[in-house]
Amino acid sequence: MSALAGVENSAGAVLRRAVELDGGGRYQESLVCYQEGIELLLQVLKATKDEAKKNHYRQKLRSYMDRAEQIKHHVLKEKEEGKYHKQIKIVENATGYSYENLFKPYVDEMLTEVWVEDPYIRHTHQLYNFLRFCEMLIKGPSKVKKINLLTSRDEDQQMSGLQEIKNSLQDFGVTLEVTFSPSIHDREIRFDNGWMIKIGRGLDYFKKPQSRYSIGYCDYDLRPCYETSVDIFHNNHTRKT
């Protein structure tokens, strides 16, 4: 397979996913896929010499770009009116819900500060969950400079683990501020670009892998999940007063 054919296949896969998400009413996620697919298809157009094929790609691009623009205006209108709300139901044993997949549509260049409220960042696997979430944030395209964690205090290893995460984040220019509450119950994540995500189980919605050498141990997209719901809102102000 040529490099051009590979890019074309990738564009087709991403755009099919965009149409699927679009049809399911998951507009913010579909917009991200449309934009990614359009960019790939533009690469194909630029590298194509045959004029008939060029016209074919131009028509496809026009159609996808028009739909992406419609969705963009629709989402923007809902955000401005404070009406944006989407719910994702994660069914028992579902896969494909890594932090990258779940949060990617809401992590953009405007994001600089994050608030995480989760009472269960205490045990070893929960600390690793939080670490993976932090890794997702600093990979971009966001410019996160501060992460605020509100959780409950538990074991001694929790303190040492959080300190190690804090030290590591400093190497990437990110400050981690941790506070504890004995009464915290709600679980939510707030971004200073206006997005708020509430997950019934917090960050701990992945099932324990069968072993250290089983599929899904490293790649969370392949890790089965517990049943939970994810509610996504947009507000102009995400900091609580």
Image (cartoon, rainbow, N blue to C red):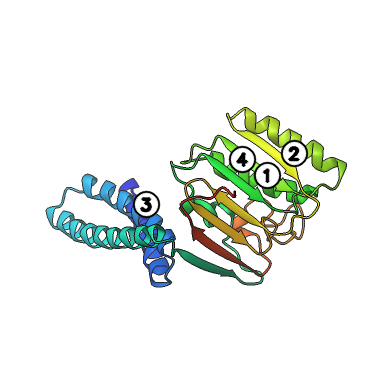
Verify CB contact (< 8 Å) between mark 3 and mark 4: no
Which residue is most to the right? 156
Q: Residue furthest front?
A: 241
The crowd level at tag 3 (other Cα within 10 Å; few <14, some 14-19, many 20+) is some
Mark 4 = which residue? 147
Residue flagged by tag 4: what amino acid is it? Ile
Helix, strand or loop at disc 3? helix
Spot occupied by residue 241 in the image (x, y as percentages of width and height): 59, 48
- Total number of numbered labels? 4
Which mark is on residue 132?
none
Residue for badge 3: 36
40 horizontally vs 45: left or right: right
- Answer whether residue 137 is visible to the viewer in this image: yes
Residue beneath disc 1: 149
Whichever of callouts 2 and 3 sits on the residue coming sooner in the sequence is 3
Identify which residue is drawn at 68% across, 47% down: 130
**Residue at image location 67% in from the left, 31% down from the top:** 168
CB atoms at circles 2 and 3 under 8 Å apart?
Answer: no
Is 85 rendered above or below residue 38?
below
**Relative to residue 136, is residue 12 drawn left or right?**
left
Q: Are marks 1 and 2 in contact (CB under 8 Å)?
A: yes
